[in-house]
Amino acid sequence: MSIDGADFRRVLGHFPTGVTVVTAADENGPAGMAIGSFASVSLDPPLVMFCPGKESGSWLRMKDAGSFCVNVMGEDQGEVCGVMASRAEDKFEGIDWTTDVTGAPVIPGSLAVMDCELHAIHDGGDHDIVVGLVKSLWTAPDLEDNPRGPLLFFQGRYGQFQDL
């Protein structure tokens, strides 16, 4: 039996995911991409993973950087996420950023941040499975005073969590 790619994407679109922006820096400056395929792998050592498309221009720039940062997007960061999901030449134009331990861009206002050293890249069909060793992590310092929910992706659209 053969699975149609469009049908596969449609069915998997019924699984809501959190949205992250994964960033890195190369000799041309910062690069980033919106990623929904992010997960924890191990507590000891602290490992996380994400799965970029092998042909992604952003991933091709980031692949040899040796480090990356996972920025967990809040519900108020849809515009930033939209730019990072685009094919814009300079995705960081007009977007503030800082760095932490690895030098990968950190996007202020993210709900959580995991700054990672590249640990391994595995084959995953038309995607790579990228594993990072977490070197630094934190949650937004203002969450207690300014609680915000996550940015979610469901059925091809960004949205917010609503406590039903």
Image: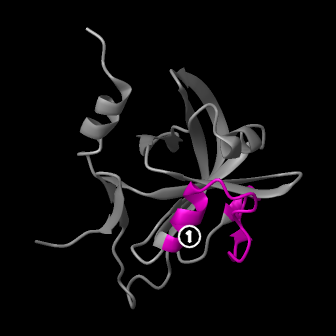
Instruction: Answer whether residue 104 is magenta in the image.
Output: yes
Q: Looking at the rendering, which quadrant does residue 74 occupy?
A: bottom left
Which residue: 44% across, 43% down?
Answer: 37
Which residue: 39% across, 88% down?
Answer: 146
Q: Residue furthest left?
A: 164
Q: Is residue 60 left or right of residue 48?
A: right
**Residue 42 appears at what percent x and percent y?**
44, 39
Q: Is residue 80 above or below residue 156?
A: below
Which region shows up in magenta?
Answer: 79-105
Foreground: 63 or 134? 63
Q: Residue furthest right?
A: 27
Q: Looking at the rendering, which quadrant does residue 86 occupy?
A: bottom right
User: Dot 1: within a 10 Å radius of its alpha carbon, few (fewer than 14), some, or many (20 or more) residues?
Assistant: some
**Residue 55 appears at what percent x and percent y?**
64, 33
Is residue 70 in view?
no
**Amino acid type, mark 1:** Val
Q: Looking at the rendering, which quadrant does residue 12 occupy?
A: top left
Q: Which quarter shows the C terminus?
A: bottom left
Foreground: 45 or 92? 92
Disc 1 is placed on an element classified as helix
Instruction: Answer whether residue 112 is magenta in the image.
Output: no
Q: Is residue 5 left or right of residue 134?
A: left
Which residue: 75% across, 62% down?
Answer: 90
**Residue 102 appears at what percent x and percent y?**
74, 55
Q: Which quarter shows the N terminus?
A: top left
Q: Main secondary structure of the magenta part?
A: loop
Q: Residue furthest top?
A: 1
Which residue: 52% across, 64% down?
Answer: 81
Tell how many labels: 1
Dot 1 corresponds to which residue? 80
**Residue 75 appears at what percent x and percent y?**
39, 73
